[in-house]
């Protein structure tokens, strides 16, 4: 009799705990898609792309100018005195070093802006996602890249994008 009671109690707890685990909702969120396709994310990408292209054009023009100056200096090598040639060569080297540092600083600035915009977007997504989790009693949210399968209903990406677009229509990058 004692074993029968223990068996019934253990079976009861197993059945109750199994049904409790079955009710836990697990959903999927494609964070990369949210970052790239929200209004703020697209705006930030467009701004950064335009800035990069403008800088690339500016630096290409500077590079052409420096190459032209170099070829002019080489063509005048026999005409100029040794001191004058050395002085102009040193000035050209300084211009090249300045060009390289400006280009590197420009690329670093764009990389920093990209990282800051990503951070701002993730900070904006966090409270939206937490509110959605509480509203719908969600147990776990997984990133889609780490998820192997599931039903399309478990994907909340579009819902989060809509809420993010309402709350954060654009990022002010300058």
Image: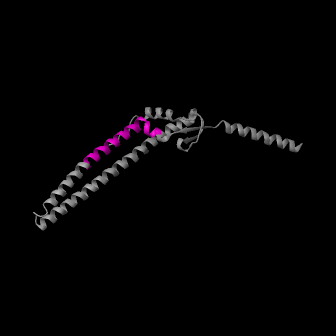
Residue 129 placement, left or right of 38:
right
Name which residue lies at 59% across and 34% down. 151
Residue 169 x/y as whole percent = 40, 34
**Residue farthest along the right direction in this orientation:** 1
Residue 160 placement, left or right of 24:
left
Up the image or down, 92 lies above or below 114; here it is below
Residue 35 x/y as whole percent = 44, 40
Which secondary structure is most common in the magenta stretch? helix
Residue 65 placement, left or right of 143:
left
* Quarter-of-image position of residue 23: top right
Residue 67 x/y as whole percent = 21, 55
Rendered image coloring scheme: one colour
The C terminus - image quarter: top left
Residue 34 placement, left or right of 149:
left
Q: Residues in magenta?
A: 33-59
Residue 132 x/y as whole percent = 54, 35
The N terminus - image quarter: top right
Name which residue lies at 36% across and 46% down. 113
* Quarter-of-image position of residue 86: bottom left
Name which residue lies at 13% across and 67% down. 83
Name which residue lies at 68% across and 39% down. 21
Q: What is the total number of numbered labels drawn onto the structure image?
A: 0
- 36 falls in the magenta region: yes
- 161 falls in the magenta region: no
Q: Nearer the viewer, residue 68 or 118?
A: 68
């Amino acid at each position: 009799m004692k074993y029968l009671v223990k068996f019934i109690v253990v079976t009861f707890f197993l059945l109750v705990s199994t049904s409790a685990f079955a009710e836990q909702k697990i959903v999927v969120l494609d964070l990369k898609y949210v970052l790239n396709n929200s209004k703020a994310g697209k705006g930030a990408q467009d701004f950064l792309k335009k800035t990069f292209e403008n800088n690339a054009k500016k630096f290409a023009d500077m590079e052409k100018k420096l190459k032209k100056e170099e070829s002019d200096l080489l063509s005048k090598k026999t005409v100029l005195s040794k001191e004058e040639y050395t002085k102009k060569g040193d000035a050209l080297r300084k211009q090249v070093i300045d060009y390289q540092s400006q280009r590197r600083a420009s690329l670093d600035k764009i990389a920093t802006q990209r990282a800051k915009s990503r951070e701002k977007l993730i900070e904006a997504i966090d409270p939206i996602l937490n509110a959605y989790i509480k509203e719908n009693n969600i147990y776990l949210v997984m990133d889609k890249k780490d998820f192997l399968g599931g039903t399309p209903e478990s994907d909340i990406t579009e819902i989060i994008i809509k809420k993010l677009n309402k709350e954060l229509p654009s990022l002010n990058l300058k």
